Image (cartoon, rainbow, N blue to C red):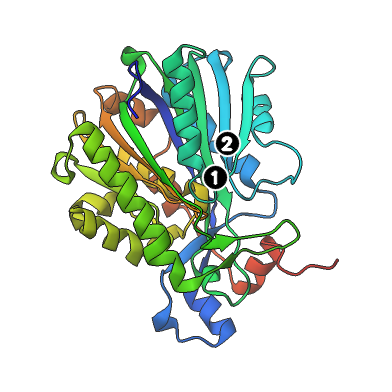
Amino acid sequence: MKPSKHVFISGYGGYVPLYRVSDEDIARIWGVNPANTPIKEKAVVAPDEDVATMSVEAVKFALRRAEIDPRKIGAIFTGTESKPYAVKPTSTIIAEAIGTTPHILAVDMEFACRAGTTALQCIMGLVASGMIEYGVAVGADTSQGRPGDQLEYTTGCGAAAFIVGSDPYNSLAEIEASASYVTDTPDFWRREDEHYPRHAHRFTGAPAYFRHIVNASKLLFEETGLKPQDFKYAVFHQPNVKFPVRVAKRLGFTTEQIKPGLLSPIIGNAYAGSSPLGLVAVLDVAKPGDRIFLASFGSGAGSDAFSIKVTDGIERKRNLAPLLSKLIEKRKVIDYGLYVKFRKKLRLR
C-alpha cells in the first residue's frame, strides 16, 4: 500500500519507565534456573503510571521534534491492549493533555502487539487524503504476564509516538509504503473477565509470528521492488530475543541490520510499543538517506511491514528531545515484591 501523496514523520518520541525487575529475581521466586531466563531485565511502570501517562510523555517528546502547534494535530490514534479504562478512551486523555481538543479525531485501537503500527497506517491514510494536516500514532502497553508463566519474564512496559504530516520541509523520515497480512490465528488471547492473557505456547511461533511477518514482508518487497540489502536497518516485533533474530535471517537481513533496534533483552516486550520503540531507537542513530524496514506482529493474528526513508531533518530534530538510550540508561532495579505491588498482582477483591 503506497500512499497517493508523500507522507512524512515530522516528530517521534519514546518513553520507558524508570523501574526494572531482573529475570534472575523472577526465576528465584519460581524456582527456575536463572541461566534459562530469556532476557536480563524488563521495564516496570511506577504505581502512578499507566498507558495514558506513558503515551503523553512519548507524544510530548514527539511534539518537541515536530516543532508544531499541537492545535494543528487533527487525529490521535492510540494502539494498546492495556488501556487504563475498560470503557473510556485513552486518546482523549492524550489529546487533552497536549492541548489539541476539542476539534480532533481521537480513537483507541486494539490488535494485540500490532495495534501501534496499525494506528500509524490509519494516520498515514488521513494525512495522505488531505483530511488532516498532522496526526499522531501511539503504540503503548503495560504488558501483562501471569505470575510464574513464561510471559512474566519478558512482558515489559513502554510507549512510542509518531507525528505524521505531508510537509517534506518539516520531516525527519518519509513513510514510503506499507503492507499487511492478517488471518484468524488464535495464538494469544484474553477474555474480558480475565486478568492475564493466555497463549498457545509453541503455536505462537511458526503459524503465528513467523508466518505473518514473513508474508507481510514479502508483500512489501513485491510492491516496492526493494530487497533486504536496500535497508540500513530492520526492526521486528520482539516478544523475546530469539524470534526477531530468526525471522530476520529467514528474510535475508543481517545481525548488524537488526541490532540497533533490538530492545527486548534490556526492557522486555512492550507489546504494542515493541516494534515502534525499536523504530525510535533506530531513528536515534540513523543518517539521512538510510532506509529502515519495520515489521510488527499482533497475536490473533497480523503483521504490518513498512519502508521508511530517513530525510535530512533527522540530524537537527533528534536532539530536540531525549534519546531513548538515555531513558533506558536511567534505571532503578526493584525486587520481585515491589514489582508485584507496582503491577497490582496481589488482588484484594
Task: For the N terminus, give its image quadrant.
Answer: top left
Local packing at callout 2 (Cα closer than 10 Å; few below 14, some 14-19, many 20+) is many
Q: CA distance from mark 2 to mark 1?
A: 8 Å
Q: Position of residue 163 (x, y in %)?
A: 46, 26
Q: How many marks?
A: 2
Seen as rendered, the residue at the extreme front is 184
Between 212 and 101, the one lying in front of the other is 212
Residue on which disc 2 sits: 78
Q: Position of residue 235 (x, y in %)?
A: 32, 48
SS for callout 1: strand
Q: Residue at x 63, y 18 (%)?
A: 104
Residue on which disc 1 sits: 140
SS for callout 2: strand
Above/below status of 321 relative to 301: above
At label 1, the amino acid type is: Ala
Q: Is residue 338 visible?
A: yes
The answer to whether 206 appears left or right of 287 in the picture is: right
Seen as rendered, the residue at the extreme right is 349
The answer to whether 329 appears left or right of 32 in the picture is: left
Q: Earlier in the sequence, mark 2 or mark 1?
A: 2
Between 96 and 328, the one lying in front of the other is 96
Above/below status of 245 relative to 275: below
Between 95 and 284, the one lying in front of the other is 95
Q: Position of residue 28 (x, y in %)?
A: 54, 83
Q: Are marks 2 and 1 in contact (CB under 8 Å)?
A: yes
Residue 245 tag number: none
Q: Residue at x 41, y 72 (%)?
A: 38
Q: Position of residue 9 (x, y in %)?
A: 38, 26
At label 2, the amino acid type is: Thr
Q: Residue at x 15, y 39 (%)?
A: 230
Q: Is residue 160 visible?
A: no
